[in-house]
Image: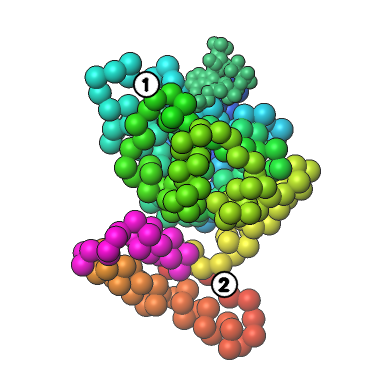
Amino acid sequence: MDFIKLTQDGYIGTITLDNPKKLNALSHGLVTAVIDSLQQLEKAEARVVILRAHSGAKVWSAGHDVGELPEGGRDPLGWDDPLRHLVRTIETCRMPVIAMIEGGVWGGAVETVLACDIVIAAPDATFAVTPARLGVPYNVSGMMTFMSAASLRVVKELAFTAAPISAERAERIGMINHVVAPEAIEEFTREMATTIANNAPLSIAVMKEQLRVLAGAKPVSPRGFEKVQGLRRIVYDSHDYHEGIRAFKEKRRPVFTGK
Ligand code: YXS
């Protein structure tokens, strides 16, 4: 597939951004390839996805493809913009997405990374929120993504300065999960992915959606609450829930089937 490499090893899918000549800019083509890959992995019953660039990448992604931004007269980040589709797909796909970061992350790519469920970065990774750098009016749900990942004060600093912050600072303020040395980051990420893949996929999928609904709804609408309750019932009525409880009492490893 152009723009990305897609692999699956058991329950673990890996999507590698692969358009280095354009610094993995989030062009319509690259975004479509990532979305298609997430949908393919969901169908192939992957239980966790790693989203990454090539080992040693100096730029993880340069953000929105500036060449595809309108020059004026229409919203550069409207509902149907590729970046908006990508963020929504990451947030709503059933399996957790782990962003494994090496190199610089710019603009809309920062929102893409923060929309992922877990972020693991090498020490050289940086994160720059760049609308102010281009005079772009960032969109509302994109701001919500940033506000869910960092305090309002930090979001203001990132947005107003458009300056890159280091992985170390991002971890210190809780914006990302871990900083891991480049020689260890692949194994560290894979171990976390394996741990997730060995847990109950239904329970994880519903907790991911529950957290999205709760974090995104202010306050939670009646329909959102009823949806969460209905989804939770699928889990506690499932074989996997019963198996998990039985296995614990019988002191053995559970065998989850996703049913
Ligand atoms: O000169 P050529 O044709 O080789 O192309 C250059 C750059 O123009 C191109 N390029 C991009 N093309 C489209 N969209 C981009 N975002 C983009 N970034 C870079 O790639 C070729 C190599 O770039 P060059 O020579 O600058 O590489 P470098 O290694 O010296 O510097 C790497 C960067 C990433 C530090 C530098 O390319 C850079 O600052 N890029 C722009 C990062 C940025 O501001 N991204 C935000 C895009 S707009 C967006 O995401 C949202 C709309 S918003 O801003 O609102 O968040």
- Could you say which is closer to the camera, residue 184 or residue 172? 172
Per the image, the residue denoted by label 1 is 69
Q: Residue at x 37, y 77 (%)?
A: 237
Q: Which mark is residue 255?
A: 2
Within 8 Å: ligand 1 and the Cβ of disc 1?
A: yes
Q: Residue at x 27, y 64 (%)?
A: 220
Say whether residue 214 is left or right of residue 190.
left
Nearer mark to the viewer, of 1 and 2 = 1
The kind of residue tagged 2 is Val
Hey, which quadrant is residue 137 in on the image?
Answer: top left
**10 Å crowding of disc 1: few (<14), some (14-19), many (20+):** some
Report the span colored magenta: 202-223
- Name the magenta segment's main secondary structure: helix
Q: Does the image show residue 45?
A: no
The kind of residue tagged 1 is Leu
Q: Which image quarter holds the C terminus? A: bottom left
Relative to 57, say whether 42 is above or below. Answer: below
- Could you say which is closer to the camera, residue 197 or residue 84? 84
Say whether residue 223 is left or right of residue 47.
left
Which residue of the protein is positioned furthest toward the left in this rendering?
222
- Name the N-terminal-most of marks 1 and 2: 1
Whether residue 158 appears in magenta in the rendering, the answer is no
Relative to 216, say whether 227 is above or below. Answer: below
Whether residue 214 appears in magenta in the rendering, the answer is yes
Within 8 Å: ligand 1 and the Cβ of disc 2?
A: no
Q: Which mark is residue 91?
A: none
Secondary element at image label 2:
loop
